[in-house]
Image (cartoon, rainbow, N blue to C red):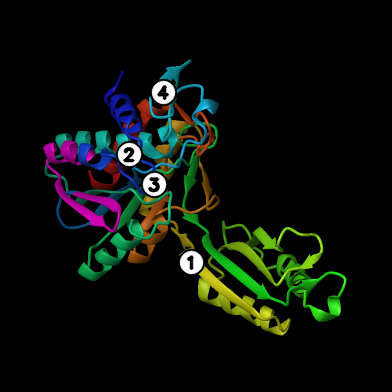
Amino acid sequence: MSDVFDLTCELIARPSLTPGDAGCQPLIAGRLAAAGFAIEQLRLGEVDNLWATHGQGGPVLVLLGHTDVVPPGPRQDWASDPFTAEVHDGVLYGRGAADMKGSVAAFVVAAEQFVAAHPEHPGTLAVLLTSDEEGDAIDGVRHVARLFAERGQRIDWCITGEPSSTARLGDLLRVGRRGSLTGTLSVRGVQGHVAYPDKARNPIHLAAPMLAELVARHWDDGYESFPPTSLQISNIHAGTGASNVIPGELQVVFNLRYNPHWDAERLEAEIAVLLDRHALDYELHWHRSGEPFYTPEGRLRQVAREVLARFAGVEPVESTGGGTSDARFIAPLGAQCIEVGPVNASIHQVDENVRVADLEALPDLYRTLIEKLLG
């Protein structure tokens, strides 16, 4: 098999459950150091981050990825050990095969090949990896980006290796992502017996009109290629488990995925007005996962469009859909960001996999992008 295949298998064999790295980054750092990259290891809290650079000055092109993976779930549900890479009918199986140890391995191989062919290339090629993408994302790229802002680290272009393709490699180019904002709401009432509602205040009944208004709200009609902002309630809990007790508190968790019409501060203010108008006794805690970002038409999108069309055989769909990625922390530094990676059909699932042919094509895809931007 190929170099990228072997490295992907080595990475899969390391059970790097978020926020653990399990030795993935030292393995990669050793290879990149041997290729002439300067290595900076940033241990922040319980999180490992790797910053490897080759060259100097601008433009600065960053290959962004993560070495952590989500838990595999019940091992017996897998056709094979999730941390032992196996190939069946031209498909490589293992946790992280698609999300995103395959892309990370391809980054490494592409970077090695590029600097070997262009040792005096203009600008800077960098690889940034974290072990805190799948978890809380506090001491990973979010924290690293703050450090970069403090020391004035320039980043012009960023390619994230998230699995973005839908049916075949290169058929989708991610040019932005929605913001994500989670609210945890507690509505207080007065607990009591269901037979004596006059002696209690049911927080479910009190909150129901507000929740109905919240979920029915039309936030916007979308923004350029972004879909409309949406709100989903993901969890509701109240009660003691007894059928004859009016609960004293209701807890609701909801999430907004929003486009650049909004920022987190404005959304939080809008929802606070709604809650106050319904005269609820409440507490509301927010978690800002990240603001939306969007890469306008320019050199990065033009190059990526041309390269992906060559690999996929068709013009890629240019999308801002999906969840979030660590590019949301790099974009505010002034970088243009895109996401290019393998097919995402099996990510986070049992028997996660990537087609071997796609995996072996990835280094050439990434190297072509690098050569057109820095060559």
Q: Residue at x 52, y 26 (%)?
A: 76
The residue lying toward the viewer, choosing from 61 and 323, is: 323
Of badges 1 and 2, the one in the foreground is 1
> Circle 3 is placed at which residue position?
18
> Circle 4 is placed at which residue position?
356
The residue lying toward the viewer, choosing from 145 and 209, is: 209
Amino acid type, callout 4 = Val
In the rendered image, residue 37 lying in the magenta stretch gets the answer yes
Q: Residue at x 49, y 35 (%)?
A: 343
> Circle 2 is placed at which residue position?
104
Is 261 left, or right, of 220 in this rendering? left
Which comes sooner in the sequence, label 1 or label 2? 2
Q: Please determine whether, in this image, residue 189 is positioned above or below residue 221.
A: below
Which comes sooner in the sequence, label 4 or label 2? 2
Amino acid type, callout 1 = Arg
Highlighted magenta segment, given as a residue range:
28-52
Q: Residues within 10 Å of mark 2 (few under 14, many from 20)?
A: many
Q: Would residue 229 be seen by someone viewing this image from the given angle?
A: no
* Res 288 label: 1
* Res 148 label: none
Per the model, the C-alpha gap separating discs 3 and 1 is 20 Å
Helix, strand or loop at mark 2? helix
Which comes sooner in the sequence, label 4 or label 1? 1
Tally the numbered discs: 4
Of badges 3 and 2, the one in the foreground is 3
Amino acid type, callout 3 = Thr
